Amino acid sequence: MTATAPSTARARATAFLPRLALVLAALLATLFTAAAPATAHAALTASDPTDGAVVATAPAQVTLSFSEQVAMGDDSIRVLDPQGRRVDTGELRDMCSGNTIRYGTALHSGLPNGTYTVAWQAVSADSHPISGAFTFSIGAPSATEVSLPTTTAGDGPVGIAYGIARYAAYAGFTVLVGGAAFILLCWRRGAAERPLQKLVVRAWVTLTAATLAMLVLRTPYTGSGRFADAFDLDGLRAVLETKTGASLVSRLLLLGAAALFVAVLFGVYARRLEDSGTGEGAEEKAEEKAADTNDLTFGLAIGGAVVSGGIAATWALSEHASTGIQPGLAMPADILHMMAVATWLGGLSALLVALHKVPGIERSAVRRFSRVAFVSVVVLAATGVYQAWRQTGSWSALTGTEYGRLLLLKVALVAVLLAVAYMSRKWTARLAEAPAALEGADAKVGAADDVSRETESVTAPADPKRAAQLARQRAALESAREKRVRDADPDRAGLRRSVLAEAAIAVILLAVTTVLTSTEPGRTVEQEAARGSAATAVPDRAVKITLPFDTGGPNGKGSVRLELDPGRVGANTLHLWADTGDGQPFDLPEIKVAFTLPTKDIGPLPVIPDQAAPGHWTASGVQLPLAGEWRIDVTVRTSDIDQTTVQKTVKIG
């Protein structure tokens, strides 16, 4: 009689896992294809000259202003003439002051008339590359051989590969930390279980490989976009000098410490738990062995917390938490947030593997994980509320920006996950050990398996086909035994299904969280909109605005206070006051004003005010012919070569 059975016990026992992996992969693919391209944290808010401007004389320099801190090098700003030749000096000028983030580059003197192209590229403070280009003209526009780029930094195949590595890194960290925490806090015996060992080790490998990939791809990701540049040693050296490069290297070093932790956890620690003895006095021996392992458990828990916290800090120090408001508080909160997510969702993955692959998991372990998950959710909620306030700042940013909508989706997923977790808690409360009758059946299966082994040892068939057939029979018996034990209790089966649902939702939640880390925060989006929005004029009241400036030269920082009275269509009186950084009158060599109504193609209408007193200029009869949103450009010169143009849009009614 020919028996039909799977080739191995594992093949049948894990037949369900590939289907689960396909479902989760499909969910991730849907998220990847449905999500809009993420916006980098920093954005260009102003330039001098402005995009499309026509200036009478060649400017001494080109300056760019950003919404957040960026990293730039000497080659980050390139100015090209109509023939595509560089006309900048190639030296970056750092003109940042306080909340003003501005960089520039000087131009060669004697530039002829024509249209010039400014191409720039930078790395945002949260590690994402940004780039762009615009044109301005000297004298009059002309034909140009320079074509503006149609793609932005971080796009293309390299950007996709880097994004996949980011997702893999987050997933690896979550499972690595959560799996180890599940073993130490909930089920110590799990350290000796092969399925859990594989889960944690594979998570470590995934995180390490993803980190190496991000480090190697960093140069093409923030630069040319060509995979070949991944082998550029000079580029790699430059990456190591950046904040992101230092964070990735630190993560690799910490993963070395994590490897030692995993080796001890699944080596010395697991052997101590297995050597508790059997037979008479086994229970007393087990208690003594448990007491002996308490010190090692405590040491592993402390060491694991320190290493995992350090790995989480490599994200906090290089992404959203490190920039914006309150970074000193935001970074510890971000570390706690990541640790709570990993403990909850990573522990959930470990529980799912244990329920499916290890029939003997105790009810007490599931209950302990339930308590650990509750604490993790509390920490997650507290840190999440703070992060939401910090990154949005208003209800309008929560509902009107991409970051806010993703955050609401994340909150909804957490709510659904908590609802499913509540069902899991109910199954946990009802969980019972396998019935005695079934244990007897299992004993029969085990006895049959023993008979099969004895028969094989006695007969010792020389025929390889017969030996393979006997091996398949043993595998079938073992698989049947495992399945009977695993499915013996309907409550246990119900718990396994609810945990599976939790895991599926957790995968989507983790993906949404990863997208959030590469999306421009709502607070920043609203700040950018406020910078570019029009200042509403109040009827019968003058328009008053203050414009900070920095020409880049010595003593080139200050501010201009502008007053346009009565601030409506027709004739107006213009007043300008220039102040130094300490509030004293700034007697500028030259100050000019221009009014432009872009929607009607009116302007720029130049105004050269007369100096009425040191630091004070006036002009009367300033005519604004139509109502609308007028852009006011104020050009300030502080020396023979140092000048800049600042602007603001105001509504004239």
Image (cartoon, rainbow, N blue to C red):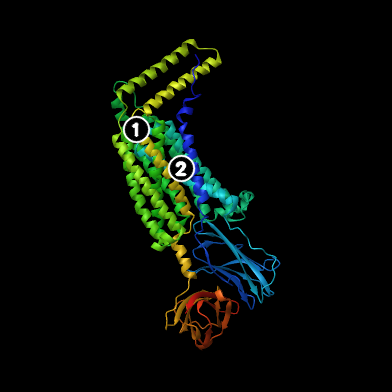
Tell me where residue 515 appears, x and y as whole percent.
48, 52
Which residue carries the number 1 mark? 492
Whether residue 5 is situated above or below residue 234 in the rendered picture: above
Whether residue 321 is situated above or below residue 4 in the rendered picture: below
Residue at 35% from the left image edge and 48% from the top image edge:
377
| Label total for image | 2
Q: Foreground residue, 307 or 211?
A: 211
Residue at 47% from the left image edge and 63% from the top image edge:
525
Give, as a three-letter code, the residue at label 1: Arg
How dense is the environment of label 2, judged by Cα within 10 Å: few (below 14), some, or many (20 and up)? some
SS for callout 2? helix
Whether residue 572 is situated above or below residue 131 in the rendered picture: below
Residue 98 shows in this picture: no
Alpha-carbon span between mark 2 and mark 1: 37 Å
Tell me where residue 393 appears, x and y as whole percent.
40, 62
Q: Foreground residue, 393 or 639?
A: 393
How dense is the environment of label 1, judged by Cα within 10 Å: few (below 14), some, or many (20 and up)? many
Q: Foreground residue, 574 or 231?
A: 574
Which residue carries the number 2 mark? 257
Residue 277 shows in this picture: yes
Tell me where residue 387 appears, x and y as whole percent.
39, 56
Judge left or right: residue 161 versus residue 579: right
Tell me where residue 456 appears, x and y as whole percent.
47, 13
Q: Earlier in the sequence, mark 2 or mark 1?
A: 2
Give, as a three-letter code, the residue at label 2: Ala
Residue at 29% from the left image edge and 20% from the top image edge:
280
SS for callout 1? helix
Residue at 41% from the left image edge and 63% from the top image edge:
396
Judge left or right: residue 615 versus residue 367: right
